[in-house]
Image (cartoon, rainbow, N blue to C red):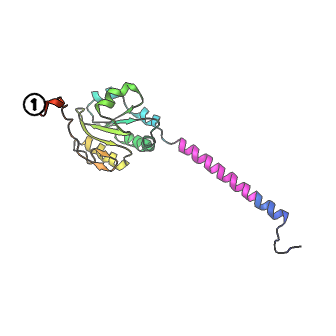
Amino acid sequence: MNSENPTSPTSNQLRNLLVAIAAIILTTALFFGFQAQQSSTSLDAVAAAAIPIDEAIANDKPTTIEFYADWCSSCQSMAADNLSLEKEYSDRMNFVMLNVDNTKWLPEVTKYRVDGIPRFIFLDRANQAIGDTTGAIPREIMAANIEAAIANQPLPHNSISSDRTSTIAEPKAADISQPRDHGKKL
């Protein structure tokens, strides 16, 4: 007999039992981890807390309009922060959510030139656009913009899109000249 490998049937059974227990614990942890992740704040919860755009435009508060889609992972990742911001500031700020997949909101999507989501448009008390952000924006930046809008101050983080920042500009008038005009004014 070989005495270098003192493995007995009981030590193999014990090892197999420990591996099976570890597998069960790991599977249970993964299951509950996925359940907790799915039960986190959803876009539906944020949309339910938001007010209709008609109501927001009719009252005397500044407004944040969020353009989103259910399939947007950045929108989903911001849902918990946005819901907490709505709860914190809803007495002084309107929060509106418009789903870009709903053609009902096409006039607003066009008006605010929504070309990426999540897109946030900040309106003053007179419903004039005072700023915007596009993409997954940290909660601190959103809170600073909301507080500035409430205080009727310039937004500290205006026109943010990814890593670019620029001031908001008025739309330019359409160029109605024809190619053959060669610069003549009409």
Residue matched to label 1: 185
Are there few (<14), some (14-19), or many (20+) residues within 10 Å of tag 1?
few
- Horizontal side of 23 relative to 60 (left or right) equals right
User: In the structure shown, which secondary structural element does the residue marked by tag 1 occupy?
Assistant: loop
State the extent of the magenta-drawn residues as a range: 17-39
Which residue does the image show at 35% across and 27% down from the upper left?
106
> Is residue 35 located in the magenta-colored stretch of the structure?
yes
Q: Nearer the viewer, residue 88 or 1?
A: 1
Q: Amino acid at mark 1?
A: Lys
Residue 166 at x, y percent in the picture: 25, 47
Residue 111 at x, y percent in the picture: 28, 30
Which residue does the image show at 83% across and 63% down from the upper left?
10
The residue furthest bottom is: 3
The residue furthest top is: 104
Residue 68 appearing in the image: yes
Residue 9 at x, y percent in the picture: 84, 63
> Is residue 95 located in the magenta-colored stretch of the structure?
no
Q: Nearer the viewer, residue 110 or 153?
A: 110
Residue 58 at x, y percent in the picture: 28, 27
